[in-house]
Image: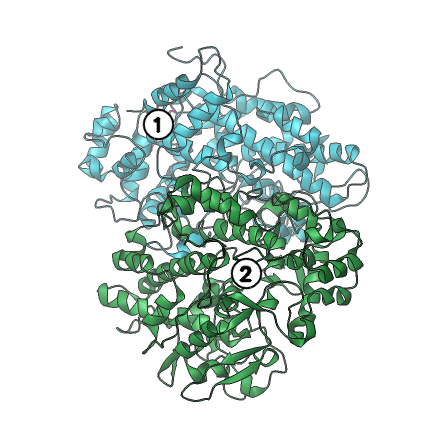
Chain colours: A cyan, B green
Amino acid sequence: MGDWLRDGLFEAAGNVIDGWAWLSGKASAAVVNRAVCTTRNRPHPWSSLSDYTSWQGLTDRSYLARHLPAVDVPVQPPPEKVREIFARQDGHALLSPKSTCLFPAFAQYLTDGFLRTSPKDVARTTSNHEIDLCTLYGRTPDQTRALRLLSSDKGRRGRLKSRMVGGEEFSPFLYKPGTKELTDPAFAALDPPLVDENLPPEQRDTLFAVGGDRVNSTPFTSMMNTLFLREHNRIAAELEARNDGWDDERIFQVARNIVIPIFIKIVVEHYINHITPLPFALRADPSVAWNAPWNRPNWMTVEFSLLYRWHSLMPDAIDWPAGPLAPARQIGIGAFLQNNRPLIEVGLDAAFSGASSQAAGELGALNTALPLLHIEDRAVVQARKNRLATYNAYRVAFGMDRAMSFNDITTNDALAAMLEDLYGEPDHVEFYPGLMAEDRVEDSPLPGLLLRMVAVDAFSQALTNPLLSEHVWNERTFTPWGFDLIARTSKLGDILARNVQQRGPTPIEMTRPGWSYKDQ
Amino acid sequence: MGDWLRDGLFEAAGNVIDGWAWLSGKASAAVVNRAVCTTRNRPHPWSSLSDYTSWQGLTDRSYLARHLPAVDVPVQPPPEKVREIFARQDGHALLSPKSTCLFPAFAQYLTDGFLRTSPKDVARTTSNHEIDLCTLYGRTPDQTRALRLLSSDKGRRGRLKSRMVGGEEFSPFLYKPGTKELTDPAFAALDPPLVDENLPPEQRDTLFAVGGDRVNSTPFTSMMNTLFLREHNRIAAELEARNDGWDDERIFQVARNIVIPIFIKIVVEHYINHITPLPFALRADPSVAWNAPWNRPNWMTVEFSLLYRWHSLMPDAIDWPAGPLAPARQIGIGAFLQNNRPLIEVGLDAAFSGASSQAAGELGALNTALPLLHIEDRAVVQARKNRLATYNAYRVAFGMDRAMSFNDITTNDALAAMLEDLYGEPDHVEFYPGLMAEDRVEDSPLPGLLLRMVAVDAFSQALTNPLLSEHVWNERTFTPWGFDLIARTSKLGDILARNVQQRGPTPIEMTRPGWSYKDQ
């Protein structure tokens, strides 16, 4: 169990390349195709609209698609009992040997862009179903307009609104100090931030006006958004200097054309390369998708919306770095929410360096921090409301053997016993607890089924982006300068270096320093 | 010129089949692939939003895509002068040797479903960009709900609202007699019919409450919609009888699942087979598209929205058949608008028989009836507002040779002289007049470039419908009975026979009786 991706992908790669040519495009293509073809391609016949296929279900994108049809699972233990599966044991976190906190920081920012299940009705979504950086640009043309500077003045064209604080560029604050009054009436078009209603004013004052309602959830997500805000405005300035006569609209649109593929490059070449157990780097080569039978419109699924609940990646406390305005300190995970002050105090380079300097938690069961534990209940309830099939049904749908014993799920006997106590037999284990209970794949931060499911959606959604399509992916769309910039970007550190006055000594990495692959 | 589709498609077919096997699926597949691959596939890099590629242009489907980028054509004669190119000469219509009036009747009903350019802003559309029978079901879930009976009573489940008139089933009337008051408050959700504001009350009283705002435009379009209304309700009754316990919602949704592919079968197997110059029948085989590189989301183009203005197909007067309530008569084309009384008087079978009994006009220049002539101006203006490239640019984009002389466009010397007088040189001829001025392809009702452009969009839009996709096209989606019904339907007459008390002797055909292909 859990070895499929390693073995299968190594084999796929080995079929087309020599030992020395790990970086070749053909190896990437083979791995991508193998990963995506693990399961049925889109369009999915089922959706969260109804238990049968219908025209509305096939076209109304406010519902979620589904990999497997709806069923009522036979055993549904009380959520607060299932919660025990997730609780961090003995009050200390299992730390990941492979991942830094940059990994959960990016994972959350990325997925908050397209996993947008409505809290009030988990069958519905406000997702655009694309990797479109709506966290930065907003979900709708109206929101995008609200976030833009809209200026025909030379030196300001095509920019997103921003504000300098201590020599650093951030998004504008959303509220006037001490009030719930918007700093800019245009911000009424934005989705209100998903924060506590009773957030203390000193925290509320630090919330940014941004495209995504979850961007303000931690200083890590705000840090990611700030990076892409600066990159957008930097690119707009370059485009303005290089294209005499371009108006505000064109500079904005072409800057966005460039920033979205840069983000997708990070998704594949930094984030996915961290996730895979492969010791060689996959490339984000758009042409892999051009003739692929899996190139079909993206559509978020009920399963994908659930499997990305990775709370266990967060340690109990974040080691927050020192900055010009504050000393280094530890922030408990419960206090690390809905407050951008730590980010503003230390600045962007220190925040990225801090995230890259500490270990993330191990992803999986028995490792969710106490302040986040109650959120796991919601996942269990959400799965039931969406009538997800059992864990074993998904193993089969994604090409794994059915688990015949609890030890087929996990080699941790105590955890296997907890599952048995909850579900009685392996066939009754629910999707989300089963997914998280599995052993992690060697050399990957993810357990086996989760790794398969993430791989399917990651590649098939990232590489089918319209900006990467055959007749769009060219210098005409991005300008020669922009096309080259996209080509030269593959890590978050590449972007950070372009957008801070001084890069510190810490490499900006999701993989911990000194990590080495087991059998290379 | 004009022989490409004949020669090319014969060759495509000949490559894979013997002389006797015209009906084989492989021949159809070869023809479809050849037809679609004449030009660049979707997604199109350009849209009516802006002159450059942008994220909004690639995702905001309220704008139209475009095959070629926007340009300002150098010669723009006054529209009322260009109009002369279209005017029917000497007051009599050129009649088509191949087509009956069933051809324009279906063409209009079909294209009114997805060519929905906003009259006030020709860069925008309200299209769903799918062949979805929104003319029958409405464009939005709210409209669909307004048109449904919504009843849990046995014998009424899953039905669309309808009304019996003289033993025949029609859509309900939209307005109470002599008023502009809706017969049903739910109809406020519908798009108001595009009719004259000062329509006489006796005509207004006959307007149907339907999904499409253009359905009421002629008795022919109302006739088509009535056919599919009856077929929906007939299928709902069958599903209700065959599936004990299915509720209103499921019967409705599954009936719609079945009716849409039936409509698509008619599009390919009746309508497109009439258009092609091939003497063998193409089949609507969904699997052709499953692995095709051209299987990309549909998106209506500015060009497609223009090229389907086929007013010349309408003769000067319609021979309207006799019915129980009215004698046979001729209705001048100017009086054949926005009035369903002729249809209600004679009933559905007589109306279809009448359309199948008379010749359509020849499609092309010099043949638009006087009452419709002023509408041609709008096409010329619409093309200029959307900044369409020249006719010759489209010839090249669709694989034809550039026209070097006006006689490369048309063998009609008088017409060539008119074009020369308007445009000076072939490279300056505008898209719409050039398209319509061409000679018709032998054995097809369409001129050459138009035939190519229609073929690209017809196949690539019909066969990529989500209901025809690989994991949806099965008995589970349609029920075994419904899947078989779809398989057994390929002509409008098949559906009519199921939905009238007595089928008359006239075959329901778009091709005139006695038509024979030239070189077979």
Report the amino acid beneath label 1: Pro
User: Does residue A315 appear in the picture of this structure?
Assistant: no
Left/right of residue B423 with respect to residue A181 in the rendered view: right
Question: Is residue A158 highlighted in magenta?
Answer: no
From the viewer's perspective, is residue A104 above or below residue B9? above
Q: Which mark is residue B445?
A: 2
Most foreground residue, B95 or A250: B95
Left/right of residue B334 with respect to residue B149 in the rendered view: right
Report helix, strand or loop for mark 1.
Answer: loop
Q: Which mark is residue A447?
A: 1
Question: Of tags 2 and 1, which is closer to the observer?
Answer: 2
Badge 1: few (under 14), some or many (20 or more) residues near its Cα, within 10 Å? many
List x then y, in percent, for residue B390. Answer: 71, 50
Report the amino acid beneath label 2: Pro
List x then y, in percent, for residue A394. Answer: 30, 37
Q: Which residues are magenta?
A: A87-93
From the viewer's perspective, is residue A277 above or below residue A123? above
